[in-house]
Amino acid sequence: MNFRPELAAKVMSGEKTVTRRVCSKNPRSPWWEKRCMLRVERDYAVCPGRGKNAIGRVLVTSPPWIERLCDIGETDAMREGFESRAAFLAGFKEINPRTALNVSVWRVEFQVFQP
């Protein structure tokens, strides 16, 4: 999974244990609105940007599900690696500037994978 470098570091430190990705209309996307490609109990590379080498791996710990971005609460915003819901939503808008706050997103829980 690709993350911004600062978020990838939070993943590897255990500060970030959830991610949300905008649902795609493209059936070849791993975030396709009808099916998420990520599977529970499988591990995935953590990359600090597209095309960057992996800095570690995470294990998906529960089935991904779809929710509305604007429904995120304070606790989950902190699990996303942000200090508050407002900070998370601002960060999400920075990464996804053309995305409305009521967009559907895949919610994926994970933990650092230690083989």
Image (cartoon, rainbow, N blue to C red):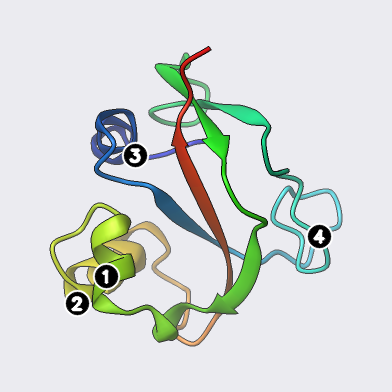
Dot 1 or dot 2, earlier in sequence: 1
Spatial CA distance of label 1 from label 2 is 12 Å
Spatial CA distance of label 2 from label 4 is 28 Å
Q: Amino acid at mark 2?
A: Ala
From this view, report whether residue 44 is shown above or below residue 69: above
Characterize the local packing of mark 1: few (<14), some (14-19) or many (20 or more) Cα atoms within 10 angstroms. few
Q: Amino acid at mark 3?
A: Arg
Characterize the local packing of mark 3: few (<14), some (14-19) or many (20 or more) Cα atoms within 10 angstroms. few
Characterize the local packing of mark 4: few (<14), some (14-19) or many (20 or more) Cα atoms within 10 angstroms. some
Dot 3 or dot 2, earlier in sequence: 3
Say which element carries label 1. Answer: helix
Residue located at (42% from left, 31% from top): 49
Q: Amino acid at mark 4?
A: Arg
The residue tagged 3 is 4
Spatial CA distance of label 3 from label 1 is 21 Å
The residue tagged 2 is 86
What is the x, y in percent for residue 15?
Answer: 24, 43
Residue located at (23% from left, 37% from top): 6
The residue tagged 4 is 35
What is the x, y in percent for residue 38?
Answer: 70, 44
Dot 2 or dot 4, earlier in sequence: 4
Tag shown at residue 108? none
